[in-house]
Amino acid sequence: MVLPTEQTALPSPVPTTSPGGGRGTSALPVRLDGVARAFPAGRGSTPRTVLAGVDLEVAPGEIVAVLGPSGCGKSTLLRQVSGLDAPTAGRVTVDGTPVAGADPRTAVAFQEPRLLPWRTLTQNVALGLPAGTPRPAGRERVARLLDLVGLSGAAELRPRQVSGGMAQRASLARALARDPGVLLLDEPFGALDALTRLRMQDLLLDVHAAQPATVLLVTHDVEEALYLADRVVLLRTLGQGAAPAGSVARVVEVPGARPRDRAARDLAELRAELLDGLGVPTHHDR
Amino acid sequence: MSDRAAVTAPSGPAGPATAAGRARLGRAGRVALGLLVPVALLGAWWGTTAAGLVPPYQLPGPVAVWDAAVDLVERGQLWHHVAISTQRVLVGFAVGAAAGLAVGALVGLSRLGDLLLAPTLGAIRAVPSLAWVPLLILWLKIGEESKITLIAIGAFFPVYTTVAAALRHVDPHLVEAGRAFGLRGLRLLSVVQLPAVLPSLVAGLRLALAQAWLFLVAAELIASSMGLGFLLTDSQQNGRVDRILLAIVLLALLGKVTDALIGLAERRLLRRWA
Ligand SMILES: Nc1ncnc2c1ncn2[C@@H]1O[C@H](COP(=O)(O)OP(=O)(O)OP(=O)(O)O)[C@@H](O)[C@H]1O
Ligand SMILES: [Mg+2]
């Protein structure tokens, strides 16, 4: 499962304690009931509905991948769960209580790294620590997380001095530092090269095994969804006004326990199905 | 020092072309180039007065001005004038800049604050500095308060304007990231928003300091018994052109030195921020 690479960024075998040295918050269930979000579209015109009728129940510790064409509302969906945005209809609960305002039980790794340019990577990751973390413990935890994402050597650099992929890994470390009950990842591996991407996927699984969290993972990559997720939620782009179907096109269970074989044959059908759903013709003959 | 031609007009961060030019020149070269014009001016001044082209009661030579300085130092007055003026500028600048920062933050971050305060502040800003003097003297007498208040008014506006404008344009993505990690209110301000506008803030502080010197002279010209502004009016009444020139040279030097200090801090900051 650990890829043979010259760098050994991964702790292997999986440590029994949390690799980030967290306090061991448990994973929390997430529930969306008829969630909709519409954005006002200029004066006079009707609001543009981006999300509609999203019902979803995510069990504690489950990894759910959110897949869908660009602009269909994946990031918007995550923002509803994080409490950074509020739905125009429906409700979102985490562990049974409604989400209202930025929720401390969730942590986000945004689609863009969004690091503070004047802080070093270490200081940026430390921003993710939960309020009230004692200083020495926090420092140690940040160092371990940076090590985990392969950034020990860049710890004292500023975001402008590192590559896009490094910044994105720092952003992931910042979210992990929170040790959240719900981890919201918006294309966390989008800016990574193929090899680092595979390594980070395994890292995520290691962290998840050791430090349980419910994970909502937005991705464009069908392979990634099938490798990481328990279920895949396929979103569709809502049309103009007509056909008030919900945003969720389908929800697919991914068979097999993790870690999965990346080349598993039994996933081929599912892969084709999801690619079809994304509108990519697969020429798949059975 | 060489790159700042005028105290009142500090330029922004240099473009890449000038930056490269500076790097090639080296530090000593830059200082030398910057001193070229002052030295030439001094030479011309000395030349015209020594040759008797201008009568001394209109333009005394550099040597006479130097003698006037030595004379005032020996009487124990020069240091006094310089110290009191510098103190007024620094205190007024600190008060005005702090108020400018606070009000700028309020107007820049809160829509209500903006709607409520911005029009009024815009109108007050339009009042020329000298128009305040009679009112301040009437209210606060000729003591230190009236002068420091005037200087604070002068320092307030550059900081207020730059901070309010910059805070409105802080990258909303960064602010949202701050909120996502539990920052709110003053913590959000100190961790995300203020650092984001720090370069603008320093530029505003630089302008404010220049304004503070400007308003100092306005205050001291009209109502004071000490300070460089007083030295100017007093010497005018006594016909001491040498002392007038001395006061002008001192104001130029003091303004330049205090500006250079902020400029130094600014350059350090920008290296880290950009
Ligand atoms: N604050 C906003 N105001 C108005 N429209 C918005 C806002 N945020 C998002 N939208 C709209 O909602 C739609 C979905 O945006 P979102 O960022 O969720 O897409 P996405 O699925 O994450 O796309 P991508 O895969 O390209 O990141 C877009 O059409 C966008 O224009
Ligand atoms: Mg997105």
Image (cartoon, rainbow, N blue to C red):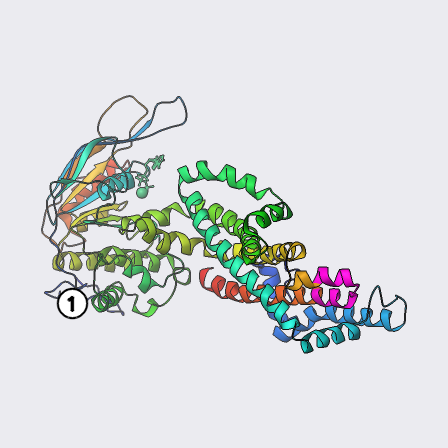
Q: Residue at point 11% right, 41% down? A: A96
Magenta highlight range: B232-247
**Is B122 covered by the magenta stretch?**
no
Residue B221 as seen in the image, left or right of residue A155: right
Amino acid at pointer 1: Ser
Q: Would you say B138 lies left or right of A11 here? A: right
Q: Residue A92 at what x, y percent from top left?
A: 18, 37
Q: How many marks?
A: 1
Task: Tell me which image quadrant ligand 2 sits in.
Answer: top left
Magenta residues, dominant SS class: helix
Residue A36, compared with residue B247, is above or below; it is above
Residue under label 1, please give it: A12
Res. A268 in view:
yes
> As rendered, which of A60 and B163 lies closer to the eye?
B163
Task: Find out whether residue B243 is within the magenta segment.
Answer: yes
- Residue at position x 10%, y 65% from top? A16
Q: In the rendered structure, the residue with mark 1 lies on which chain?
A: A
In the rendered image, which quarter contains the C terminus of chain A?
Answer: top left
Q: Secondary structure at mark 1?
A: loop
Q: Which quadrant would residue A130 be assigned to in this image?
A: bottom left
The reply to whether residue B1 is in sight is no
Label 1: few (<14), some (14–19) or many (≥20) C-alpha neighbours in 10 Å: few
Pick whichever, A237 or B189, lies toward us.
B189
Camera-nearest residue between B124 and A191? B124
